[in-house]
Image: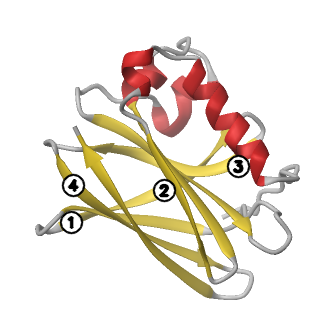
């Protein structure tokens, strides 16, 4: 994989502003479905957001948001899972990681997803589309491999799909 270099975000606040811009560009009904949180694990800050695909379908057909990951799939319960990684000490964005997620309904088996790099504005983020079959509590277990030093970071977030 080619190593990507992007202008680093100078603060985690910049990421929040980018996510807010996306959220504010869509209807209030879709906004109610958004979930986000963060954790600091082994000196890496992990931000996650889960957005209904309807939010991304509202962008123009040729836009970067509509084209990412090969286009927004159809389906009522499709969501976009996105992960942003930062060095917790320096605030520098981490762009060369490998990110996978295991998503499972609580108490049941899960499915593995590779989260691909994509741009939010001019900032590299990782993400992919997931279909949540029914209203339930889901565990999203992330596995981040940092090739620079070989570290493997793991964190689990909970998501309640309604």
Indicate which disc residue 110 carries: 1
Q: Are marks 1 and 3 in contact (CB under 8 Å)?
A: no
Q: Residue at x 86, y 70 (%)?
A: 90
Q: Residue at x 70, y 79 (%)?
A: 43
Q: CA distance from mark 1 to mark 3?
A: 27 Å
N-term mark: 3 or 2: 2
**Residue beneath disc 2:** 115
N-term mark: 4 or 3: 3
Which is nearer the eye, 137 or 87? Answer: 137
- Residue 86: % across, % down: 72, 64
N-term mark: 1 or 3: 1
- Secondary structure beneath label 4: strand
Q: Is residue 105 above or below residue 50?
A: below
Q: CA distance from mark 4 to mark 3?
A: 28 Å
Q: Residue at x 68, y 42 (%)?
A: 16
Indicate which disc residue 124 carries: 3
Q: Are marks 4 and 2 in contact (CB under 8 Å)?
A: no
Mark 4 vs mark 2: give the one in front.
4
- Secondary structure beneath label 1: strand
């Amino acid at each position: 994989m080619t190593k990507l270099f992007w202008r680093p975000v100078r603060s985690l606040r910049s990421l929040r502003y980018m996510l807010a811009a996306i959220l504010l560009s869509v209807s209030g009904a879709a906004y109610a479905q958004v979930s986000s949180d963060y954790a600091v694990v082994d000196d890496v800050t992990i931000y996650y957001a889960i957005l209904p695909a309807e939010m991304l379908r509202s962008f123009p057909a040729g836009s970067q948001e509509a084209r990412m990951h090969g286009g927004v799939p159809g389906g009522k319960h499709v969501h976009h899972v996105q992960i942003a990684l930062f060095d917790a000490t320096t605030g520098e964005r981490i762009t060369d990681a490998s990110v996978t997620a295991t998503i499972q309904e609580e108490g049941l088996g899960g499915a593995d997803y590779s989260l691909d790099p994509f741009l939010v504005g001019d900032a590299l983020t990782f993400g992919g589309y997931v279909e949540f079959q029914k209203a339930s509590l889901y565990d999203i277990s992330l596995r981040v491999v940092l090739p620079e030093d070989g570290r493997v970071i793991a964190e689990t977030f909970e998501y309640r799909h309604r």
